Amino acid sequence: MRIAVVDDSFDDRQRIVKYLEQFQNEHNLPFEIKVFHASFDFLEEYHGDYDVIFLDIEMPGSSGLDVAREIRGKDQSVGIIFITGLAQYAIEGYEVQAIDFMVKPVGYYNFSMKLEKAFRFIETHREQDILISNKDGVFRIGVSDILYIEKDRDYVLFHTRQEDYQTRGSIKEIKSKLGSLAFSECTAGCLVNLNYVRRVGKDSIRLTTDRELPLSRRLKKAFTEDYINFMGGM
């Protein structure tokens, strides 16, 4: 497992690395740990190759929230845990789907609980592909690239980060393909990838792409519960 620690404080970086090494020894897990003292250096090197990122919110230059927004533009599956001296910043973690946050100074027990939560997040978000076919051929789509899926008469439309795909079928069939992956129905015939939900409102949801989708009264409770559970109850 590859883990990045991004914090401008030497003492705080060292504390997190020490805790990672302790956790690694206690659970006999192989970690590859890389430390960054500046957000710019981290973003310059980032290529979507980390499993978990411990990210300080208050850093000079780009803040941890700015860094997380940029990361989420290219990577929906990495687990982000914010480290902050002020708990008031934590609520903004919803916007970038952070797993959780820790308030400095971080204690080992709290740290180990958050790291175990990160493992569960990673398992839920592990990359999977599905195949769809239409008149143009057969396409392999990464589930993490799907924003939402909606019914269109005898067809199903897959709206992805890159483009849209249409195939014959039903939402029921797609649900069976997706299994227990992180999708929930916001209206009848519209499945949303919970990775891309930024806000759940009174009668609509907003995606991280700023697209608004309707949220039916009948499905609102179930959708909201699915999203809270997906976020680990944060």
Image (cartoon, rainbow, N blue to C red):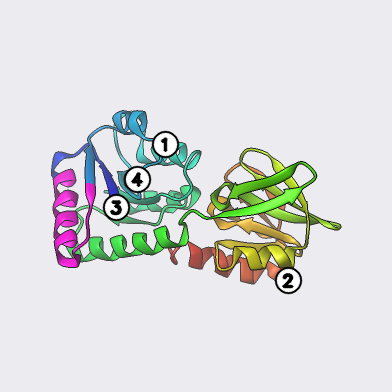
| Element assignment for label 4 | loop
Rendering coords of residue 3 (x, y %) = 28, 48
Residue ID at (34%, 45%)? 50
Q: Which residue is mark 4?
A: 50
Per the picture, the main secondary structure of the magenta-coloured stretch is helix
Q: Which residue is mark 3?
A: 1
Task: Return the residue nearer the eye: 75 or 113.
Answer: 75
| Element assignment for label 1 | helix
Q: Earlier in the sequence, mark 2 or mark 4?
A: 4
Q: Earlier in the sequence, mark 1 or mark 3?
A: 3
Q: Earlier in the sequence, mark 3 or mark 4?
A: 3
- Tell me the distance, in whole angstroms, between the alpha carbons under discs 2 and 4: 39 Å
Circle 2 crowding by C-alpha within 10 Å: few under 14, some 14–19, many from 20: few
Q: Earlier in the sequence, mark 2 or mark 1?
A: 1
Three-letter code, disc 1: Asp
Circle 4 crowding by C-alpha within 10 Å: few under 14, some 14–19, many from 20: some
Q: Which residue is mark 2?
A: 218
Disc marking residue 66:
1
| Element assignment for label 2 | helix
Disc marking residue 41:
none
